[in-house]
Amino acid sequence: MTSNEITDLLAKAYIDELETVMNYLTNSIVLDGVHAEEVKESLEADVQEELEHARMLGERLKQLDESPPGSEEFEARQSSLQPPEDTTDVQSVIEGVLEAEEDAIETYQALYEASGEANDPLSEDVAVTILADEEAHRTEFRGFEKEFPTD
């Protein structure tokens, strides 16, 4: 039997992925400047991957006879990933992405652990699959952080 902890983590991750989609999409549109292009392209590509994560999480919830949360259950939490007032402030977006990725990694590690304890290999597989993607995103944005010019 799958625990409530697993379904709670799946639902949290689902909402977090959709909030990330919104923020990545917005930042990929609003950033300006010569140094912004590579970051914008990466964010735009990551939007599709984050949507796929949400789909996987929603499908797993459905398999567990739960419904993915709707918009009324949404509470924005990614304050550091909001579009910057200065649209050339790419560094703040990079920092926001790193914070969001750290939060996602923590969530998927907790889901992996809870799934193992509950002997739920399918939820464990979802956690491992998405965790690998989130760690790759973090690595990419750590690279941007190192290369980005500081004024």
Image (cartoon, rainbow, N blue to C red):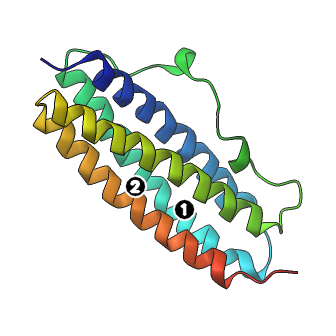
Label ID, residue 139:
none
Q: Is residue 107 left or right of residue 20?
A: left
The quadrant of the picture occupied by the N terminus is: top left
Identify the element where label 2 is drawn.
Answer: helix
Q: Residues within 10 Å of mark 1 (few under 14, many from 20)?
A: some
Percent coordinates x, y for residue 151 in the rendering: 88, 81
User: Dividing the picture into quarters, in which one does residue 135 lie?
Assistant: bottom left
In the image, taking residue 144 as reference, residue 33 lies left or right, namely right
Report if residue 17 is visible in the image.
yes
Residue corresponding to mark 2: 49
Residue holding disc 1: 44
88, above or below 125, in the image: below
Crowd rating for badge 2 (residues with CA inside 10 Å; few <14, some 14–19, many 20+): some
**Viewer-proximal residue among 81 and 50:** 81
**Residue type at mark 1?**
Glu
Residue 70 placement (x, y as % from top left): 47, 19
Number of on-image labels: 2
Residue 9 x, y percent position in the rendering? 37, 29
Q: Where is residue 91 in the image (x, y as percent from the top left)?
A: 75, 68
Is residue 31 among what the camera can see?
no
Quarter of image, res 74: top right
Answer with mark 1 or mark 2, whichever residue precedes in sequence: 1
Q: Residue at x 68, y 61 (%)?
A: 95
Q: In this view, does 38 lie above or below 84?
A: below
Q: Which residue is drawn at 88% across and 54% down?
A: 85
